[in-house]
Amino acid sequence: MEYKLKPISSAGIAEATIEAERYRNLNEPEEAESICRDILAVEPSNQAAVRLLGLAITDQFIGVSSDRFREANEIFQKLADPYERIYHMGLLYERRAKSQLYAGQPPHTLLPLFEHALEFFQEASTLSPPGNDDAILRWNRCVRLLDGVKHRLEEYLIGFDVQDAPPI
């Protein structure tokens, strides 16, 4: 027997969006991702579903090369509002950096990721609606994390000896 996906109704999109948010809050990003894909199958330009899908994918990052960074990037590029697109690109880089940090990746690989996140958050803060300081809050969190990463980088470099390098 062949199983096929069933489309949801247009009338059910609002409730499905609430369900996707609920599953993200319950730390079940795979469920949220599935719901967002169902919404987008019916309404491909639904911005809430695009945003939630990208976030659900980044919720699944574990700091390895198989993380779906490129896919999340392509999804966030579909956000129509420039502020939303740039802010979520900052989140993408921040989440990649944090997942790699928690996975124990070398500190020198984390700095460029955090720096890209900061660039996006800086740009987003210039586009943010009045009273929306989300980009500044994310900027500050990245800066605090960078302080710890820079300390680890200094320790890493102290332990690196010239003889550890390959011959020229």
Image (tube, helix red, strand yellow):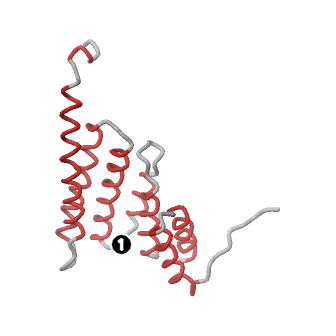
Residue at the extreme bottom: 11
Q: How many marks?
A: 1
Residue 164 x, y percent position in the rendering: 27, 17
Q: Residue at x 78, y 62 (%)?
A: 2
Residue 24 x, y percent position in the rendering: 46, 67
Label 1 packing within 10 angstroms: few (<14), some (14-19), many (20+): few
Give above or below for 90 relative to 65: below
Residue at the extreme right: 1
Judged left or right of residue 73, residue 128 is left
Residue 27 x, y percent position in the rendering: 47, 63
Residue 77 x, y percent position in the rendering: 38, 63
Give above or below for 15 relative to 103: below
Determine whether the residue tagged by mark 1 lies in a helix, strand or loop: loop
Q: Residue at x 18, y 47 (%)?
A: 147
- The kind of residue on which mark 1 rests is Ala
In this figure, which residue is indicated by the disc labeled 1?
80
Q: Residue at x 18, y 39 (%)?
A: 151
Q: Nearer the viewer, residue 152 or 18?
A: 152
Q: Quadrant of the N terminus?
A: bottom right
- Within the image, what quadrant is residue 117 found in? bottom left
Q: Quadrant of the C terminus?
A: top left
Give above or below for 66 relative to 53: above
- Within the image, what quadrant is residue 148 found in? top left
Give above or below for 140 relative to 165: below
- Within the image, what quadrant is residue 142 found in? bottom left
Q: Residue at x 68, y 73 (%)?
A: 6
